[in-house]
Image (spheres, grey):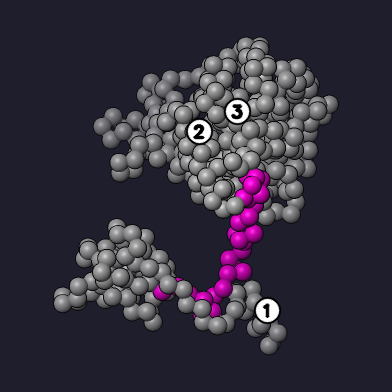
Amino acid sequence: MADLSVNVAGISAPNPFWLASGPLTNTAYQVMKAFDEGWGGAVWKTVGEPVINVSSRLASIDYGNRRMMGLNNVELISDRPIEDNLREIAEVKRRFPEHAVVVSLMLPSIPEMWKDMMHRVEDTGADGVELNFGCPHGMNERGMGSVIGQVPEYTEQITAYAKADSRLPVIVKLTPNVTDIRNPGRAAVQGGADALSLINTINSVMGVDLDTWLPRPQIDGRGSHGGYCGPAVKPIGLYMVSALANDRKVKVPLVGIGGIESWQDAVEYLLLGAQAVQVCTAAMHYGFRIIRSMTEGLNDYLNAKGVARVEDIVGRSANKVGDWNDLRLSYSYKVVAKIHEDKCIGCNLCYVACDDGGHQCIDKGPEMKSPVVREEDCVGCNLCALVCPVPGCIEMQEHDLGIVETWRQRQDRLTSLS
């Protein structure tokens, strides 16, 4: 049995799977039910001055037979009184002392309010707080949420408000609605953040009903931009986690969020530098029970790899992601497609894709059983393998041309010759 326990900036948990702040962590009933199922931690739905929400709040995108490939919401922070939330947080922590209970906070930019709330959260026994600097709708129109996370100076300042006169670890949750995630990440660290979590939801308009011409979700005939999440956003989350993991100015633990619904998704985040992960959409879609396959799958994976502790894989792939300038150029190294005739079903999708959207290097004649790649013209773009419906039919074979040169090395070489 591998050791799945984690410690993120002093916040310990029996496993790296935490529920993210959202509708599914709104009450003690939900969080305790999740812990009973096996979740290692939970970030309580954002607490602040109670708001009045709208109805309806969610919309989703289906893709093929897949439901909820992406989810959009316009729900705001908790509409429950602060006192009720804090009382229930204390109750959960008493019953589950070994689990991570983190409280998401969102307050106006007033130091006294932050000081007061941090002390009130401390009194509950919670393990830490997460500053919601990412909510892209509703609260940002009120001067909170992503408007803080989009301005590094504000991020640093409000983080410092939370850190002042408090012993609780502070996690800053970053918005992806920025040009370069490193800037707010560095600012949060400068303000005293003990850890960073990312990504929050992405600004989006989910769609328009073609019959009624109303946006989705619609609230009495109107809609608004909302936060986009779900499996579709995972590549964005992975990129941003890797960007911060490789940033020398960000030397704090990271918590990965975005499109995680399996142990494999979680391992990808861990390999790129996250010490724990948060899950929201998948648990809303399939229920808290998905944690069983997540912990079992992660344990089996670590055992198969001969890894004793989950923390031993954190960041193992991070340094494999870097600048394009450091990739070997195609006259140095390339991959070439090979179509295995014995597996080809003759659908010609590879031929059509290559001819219209690729590099016109696949031939298909009337007497040919399957298309054939002209290796000398193939640039190794992968398009044919991506569209092929038969696993293993198109193999991308590596060709090492003996030269090792990247764009950066090429430019240095040319400069030395001039």
Report which residue position mark 1 lands on. 412
Image quadrant holding the N terminus, namely: top right
Q: Is residue 399 above or below residue 138?
A: below
Q: Position of residue 186 (x, y in %)?
A: 72, 46
Nearer mark to the viewer, of 3 and 1: 3
Q: Is residue 291 left or right of residue 362?
A: right
The local crowd at label 3, few if under 14, some if 14 to 19, many if 20 or more residues have their Cα within 10 Å, is many
| Kind of residue at badge 3 | Ala
Q: Position of residue 26 (x, y in %)?
A: 55, 20
Residues in magenta, as a range? 307-336
Q: Is residue 329 above or below residue 98?
A: below
Q: Is residue 62 above or below residue 343?
A: above
Q: Nearer the viewer, residue 64 or 115?
A: 64
Which dot marks residue 291? 2
SS for tag 1?
helix
| Kind of residue at badge 2 | Ile
Q: Nearer the viewer, residue 37 or 349?
A: 37
The local crowd at label 1, few if under 14, some if 14 to 19, many if 20 or more residues have their Cα within 10 Å, is few
Q: Position of residue 270 (x, y in %)?
A: 60, 47
Q: Is residue 328 above or below residue 386?
A: below
Q: Is residue 260 left or right of residue 114?
A: left
Q: Residue at x 22, y 63 (%)?
A: 345
SS for tag 2?
helix
Q: Residue at x 34, y 40 (%)?
A: 66
Q: Is residue 26 visible to the viewer in this orientation of the structure?
A: no
Image-quadrant location for residue 127? top right
Q: Is residue 410 visible to the viewer in this orientation of the structure?
A: yes
SS for tag 3?
strand
Image quadrant holding the C terminus, namely: bottom right
| Kind of residue at badge 1 | Asp
Q: Residue at x 64, y 59 (%)?
A: 319
